[in-house]
Each structure stands twice: as structure tokens, then as C-alpha cells.
Amino acid sequence: MSNKRRKIYMAAGHTTVSLGTGRKEFNPKKPRPGVEDYVREAGQGTLKQVGGGKNVDEGVIANFMAARFNRQGHLAALIPYVDPDMRWKPCVRVEGACGSGGLGLMTAIKSVLAETAEVVLTIGVEVQNTVKAIYGADILAGAGWYRGERKNGHAYFFPALFSDRAGAYFKKCGRDKTRQAFARWYRNAIENARLCDTAQEFHNACADLEALALTEPNPRSFVDHLNVYDCSKVSDGAAAIAVVSEKGLERAGIPKSEAVEIVGWGQVEADLTVPPEDLTRLETTARSVAKALQSAGIGLGELGTVECHDCFTISGLLSVEAIGFAKQGEGPDYILAGNTSRQGAVPFNTSGGLIGWGHPTGGTGVRQAVTLWQQLTGKAGNYQVPIAAQRPYGLSVNMGGNDKTVIAIVYRRAE
Amino acid sequence: MNYAERMENVAVLGAGGKMGSGIVLLTALEMADLRLQPENKDKDFSLQAVEVNAKALAGLMGYLRDQAKRAAEKKAVGLRAVYAGRADLVENEEIVRQYVEDVLAVVRPTTKLEAAYDAKLVFEAVNENADLKVKLLSQVKAHNTQDAWFLTNTSSIPISELNKKVGLDGRIIGFHFYNPPAVQKLVELIRAEATRPELADFAAEFAKRLRKIVVPSRDVAGFIGNGHFMRDALHAIAEVDRLTPEFGFPDAVYMVNKVSQDFLIRPMGIFQLVDYVGLDVCQSILRVMNERLPGGKLHSPLVDRLLALGVKGGQFPDGSQKDGLLKYEKGRPAGVYDLEKKAYVPFAEIAARADQRLGAPPTQAKPWKAVMGMPDKPAFLEAFFRELRGLKTMGAELATRYGRRAKEIGLELVTEKVAARDEDVNTVLLTGFYHAYGPVNTYFD
């Protein structure tokens, strides 16, 4: 089975602002754009760069729970709303919880591989500020196993699942150092976000981020082992990118220097009804990354930057270990040594990641691809990090639920 | 009778009022929480919400529904455990909805005082009028079948006086919430000499379960809170009288109000606070205090005159501010009542010249809200007031006089043993009035 029968590229990325608490323009009492507005803004941002909808063959939209957050289903039919030239073309909506965006990219990649399309418009979107956090927690809990887990679960269902992972990690590797690593992870995320004007934490002006992040968790009002700074925020946002073939690049008039080539991927699914065997490991993530690196034929030493799925600081830390940069139990040291910061050996989440940029759940996977496309083609502006010639690759890891759906993709600048 | 049994049947008198509605809310939440404990599941907990004004009762139910929902959202983490046995309640939303229903199910709104006749606990929160309180409490006492205990929310009337006039034989205690009860952390507890110890213990437990900060006050008219507030306001009025001949009444009011807010870093100016409480309520409190503390000059001709002209302050049912001595636009002071013109003079016509007269506040000045959030508040206040004392402006002089008077009032309350110690006075002002610092300090020495 050859999974790379054609070259696949991505280009023309665009993101909206990640709107929510922290952004100056966010006011929970005032009307805000709806899901269709985000789809249109992100989609048009990409279409403008590929010569419009007439140059596009198919559309994919990734979303987790618009049916509940926005009472809106049937999202594929919003793609023609982006551009009338998208009418009468095949469009599909995909869902894999917070891994929806990654599934969207994989769906587009497969269309191009199948040669049913040369250019696929891929959009990821989530608009979550329509409900208070306590009800948003209900909706997001849909990423777990409802019948088997929800009733006995916590009010803040997902924060509690990852709090349990954090608690298990504390036991194994020590609480203080691990929490210091969480705090450093938070600081890196916010410092990166301050450089990216679409990031939700762009306006964050806190002077001592690590001190803030070390606020003791309050189990009475939240969860046992995490505080709110350990968590990504509630976000409204969308991202779009074009997944194209070589022919598609030509048609869209995009030079290769402005595109990234997709050199490998790993798409992995675990059983929703089976709890993780080891709370201190992201096994599905590890499998997906290993597959992606293998299919790209590269080693960790060749990665110049990574977008990982840090929905919580603990998931950031466990991702570092699952990807393989640190052995189990050594993630905190790796982070505290500065390796994941923008000056470090492998800058992680250079536009802020889920904690800093924001986490519009179903849109995140596509947003990660946009950030990597910007970094690898030199379009990252203020948050650009240097990409060394000996480390030319980027890796994105997009996770759905409690390490159930994971999509890892390897990119490099096209040539 | 233990705590939970006492709480099984409660009546709140004046349930639709500003204070009463908050008291109903907090009590209903507490009763619902008790009822949800497994050992109480077969008991009926009822709160008779007694209010003569039927329209206010309708408003009360809407208020309770909103506030119970908010409370449920805030304690959703704990509520999931409370409803763990209910297989039909899975999502937070379902749990919140059920809790709101359970809280509302406790409350029995009524316009009939008879509903209080079977209550084991009666919480009185009617207007601050001693005759009215005595009349209602006497009627309930005469017919009550349960030897009820009485809590009164009076902010000024001595408890021993109510005890004696109603003939309660020590079955009453002062339980004074601050406005709004659901938000303000403070409760002043006032024992009459005759108050039964077991009632005092009950009141302390009730306050603790409501997570309130309790300050004991001696049973002297006005207690600590109004004992300070009324004298503080009378100082402001005296300053207005002193400044009026030279600057005119509206300018004098504007200046004293501004100094008390911006130069003293308080959450609102003194006259805005008077309006917030209501000129009519202030008048009643002053009357109660003045009658019982003769020689204290606890009286204001200005307040009487304003009320005679129909200027009242207080709040609309939706909580927004009514015009009083000041006029309000979008909740903010925007004008001053001119006694001669019998109309409001906009701040815009006063501000420029009055601000110039006062001089700039200290350069370090920060709004009250910013100061409240400071990690090292005392250091900031120390530096701020040191600078203020060094200024030769009229604003600084008025502020210093004001700060000294506020301290003097606080110390007198301790000397008179209304408060047991300086710290109690400060706690009342910090938690009942949201001041950034207590009046008994060294900032103005």
C-alpha cells in the first residue's frame, strides 16, 4: 500500500482572530459573529490567495459541536456561503472532537491523493462563547463516552480527565517540578501569543506569568490538580488552508516557495469506551507521531518546530514525551531547560498554541497547519522563528478527546 | 431542636424588599441544601415569603430564579455529588435546572402574615420603622404555635427594645445583612442582654453556613455600621454647610462628594452612597438613633428638607439608581440638586471650576477598584496618603479633615463599647461598605 502516490501541498492559510476572554474586543454581553461568519471570513481569506472559488474542486469543513454550541448542523452547506463558485461542488463536514481539524486535513489530502481534486478548501471552525463555561463543559464532554463516563464525571469533565492525568504524573515524577514546568509552558504560550495579533492572549499584559500560573488549584470550584491557567480558554475562531496537488498550485498561481509539502502523516484512532491504560502517557499520540515520522522518513533531530495539542499544560508536557523529545518522566526537565520556548532547540506552538492562541475546538487542527505553513514559508511576521537548514521540518499533532483521535502531519517548505 | 429542625419552617417578613429578597434567597439556598441531605429527604422545608405588596412578590420569584441559577452554576462541582443518585440528571444543565426547582420549591410566596404562625424561625426585614416592626412581631408572636425564634435585620433599632416591646423573653437577635445580602460578605450580629445563648449559637452557625463574615456589635442604636456611616455622612453634610456660603450649595456637594471618592479612594462618593441607601432610609435611621442617643446631634435638616421636596434616592425595582441629592445617568452621578432652583444642575456646569478649586488629587491617585486589586495595598495607601498630606490644595485639606473625622468616629465607637475593638470597626467598613482601608488607621495623623 503506497500512501504517497502524488505530492501533496498546503498553501494560502488564513485564520480569524480567536475571540473570547482576554481579547479587548470581547464583550460577553454584546452580540458577536456567528459560526457562518467565521466560516466565511476564514474561507475567503484562503480563497483570495488561490484565485477564488472557481479554482477549487472540493470543500471540507471540520467542526466538533456546532449542533449544540450554535444549534447549527449541516455545515458542509456553509462552504458555498463562502463563495458562490463553491456551489455545486462536493463538500463534506468531518467531526472528531478536538481532532476534527486534523481529520479535515486528512480528508482533503485523501481527495487530492485520489485525484478527485487538485485544490481542496479546508476550513475548521468552532464558536463556543454562546454558552457559559459550565454548560460548554457539558457540550465538550461529548468528546468522551457519554453513556459510560458522563454521569460519574466531573462538572468540568475534560479539565478533570486531564487533572487526573496531572495528579498521576505528580505522583510519579513529583508535584513541584511538574507544576513549575506547567507554569513555564503557560509563560511560553502567552509570550508567543503576544507576538501574534490574532491570538486570544495577544493583549495579555501580565508581568509575572509563572507566578500567576502557580496559583494553587481549587478543587471546590474547579478541579483537583489544574488551575484555569493550565487550561486553554473558550474560543470562537476559524482557520482555513488549501490542500493542493502540484497541478493545483499551478492553477492557483502559487509558487512552490509559498507552499509547504506534506511529507508524512499518521492518523490513529483509539476505542472511545476504553480508559487510558497509563494516565501518564499519551499512547495514541505517540503512535500517531511515530507513524508520521516514519512515513516522512525523518527523525526528531530534523524537526525545526512543532505545533502540539496543549489543550492543557499537562497535555503539552505529555506530548513532549509522546513525540519522543523527552523520556517518560523527563518532560518537565526538557521544558524547564527552555527547549520548547521560541529560543529553544525546537520551538513549540510559536503563535501561542491552544493555551495562547486559543482553542476553537473543531478548528484547531487547521489552525496548527496554518501556523506551520507560515513558519516554514517565512510568513509568520512577528512570531517567525528561524528554521535552520538542518532542521527543515515542521510537525503538527492534533488530538481529539482524551487521546482518542490523533492526527500527526509532517511538513516542509516546498521546493 | 437542632439546627436543621429549626430551619424546616422559616418565615421572612418583608420578603419583597431590597433586603428581604436577598435574605429569602440566601435562606432558601440553605434550606434547599439541607433538604438535599440524605437524612432530610422525607422532610418538608418551607420558607414563607411574606410580603404585603403582591407585585413585589412577583418580582421576588423572578429574582430568586435568576439568582438560584447563578448559585447553582457556581457550585455545580458539588451539586453533581448531591444529585449522584439521580440517573436522570447527567449534564450540568440538567443538574442546575433541578437545583433551581428545588430551591424554588422551598419558597411559598404569600401576602398573608398568618403564614408565619407556624414558623419555627421568623426573619424580620420590613421597613426601618420601630412601630411597624413591633406591631408585626407582636402579631406573629401572639399567634405563633412554635415558640419561634426571631431574627431581625434592623440596622439601627436596639434589639433589647424590640425584645421588651414585643415581649419575646430573649427569643430575638439582631442579624444585620448589608445591601445586597447575596453579595456583601458582612453580617453584624447583635445580642440583646436577654438574648438566649442557644439562639446566639444558632445565629452564629447560620451566618457561618452562609459563609458570612460576622462582626458582633453591642446593642446600641445604629450598631457599628450605621453608627459609623451616619456620623460620616453628617460630617460630609456639615462640610457642605461650611462651604456653601462661599461656593454655593451645588458646588459644595460636588466637591465633598468628589473628595470622599477620589481623594479618599472609596467605592462611591458619600452623597452617592446616601442616595444608594435612600434619603428616606437615612432619615429613619437618624431618627431612631437620635431618639435613643440624645445629645449626639444625629439629625440633618438638609435630609428633612430634601425629603419634603420629594427628593428621595433609593433604587428602582430593577436595581438602578433613582435620582436623589445627585442625579444619575447610566448609574453614574451626573448632576446635583439645587435647593433654590429645585432642579438638578449638571456636573458639566460645575466640574471645571470646582475641580480647579480642589486642585489635582495626588499624582499616585488610582481608582478604588484598581486599589482593591493591589497585592500590596497598605504600601500603596501609605505612600498615597503621605503625598496627600503634603499637598496644600483645598481637596487635600478636605480629604485630611474627612479622614481624621472618620477615624475619630471609629475610635468613639470603640470607646463607647459599641465595637469591641478597632479591628471590628475596620472589618465592618471593609466588608460591609467595601472600603479599601478601615477608618481607624494612621494615614491622616
Image: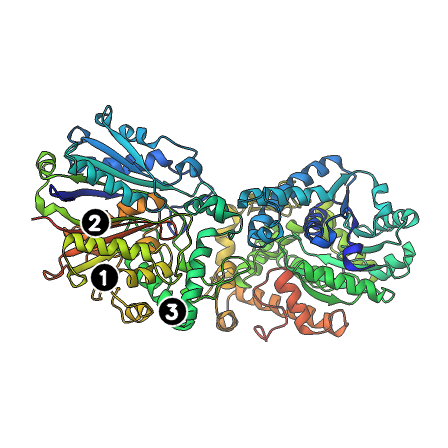
Amino acid identity at mark 1 = Pro
Task: In the rendered view, tell whether residue A70 sits above or below residue B410.
Answer: above
Are the numbered discs 2 and 1 placed on the same chain, yes or no? yes
Amino acid identity at mark 3 = Thr
* Residue named by callout 2: A265
Residues at marks 3 and 1 touching, judged by CB atoms closer than 8 Å: no
Which residue is at the front of the view, B253 or A154?
A154
Are the numbered discs 3 and 1 placed on the same chain, yes or no? yes
* Residue named by callout 1: A347
Q: Residue at x 59, y 58 (%)?
A: B256
Label 1 sits on a secondary structure element that is: loop
Q: Quadrant of residue B105?
A: top right
Give the CA distance from mark 3 to mark 1.
20 Å
Looking at the rendered image, the disc whose residue lies closer to the viewer, 2 or 1, is 2
Question: Label 3: chain?
Answer: A
Label 3 sits on a secondary structure element that is: helix
Label 2 sits on a secondary structure element that is: strand
Q: Of marks 3 and 2, which one's residue comes earlier in the chain?
A: 3
Which residue is at the front of the view, B355 or A51?
A51
| Residue extending furthest toward the top | A88
* Residue named by callout 3: A178
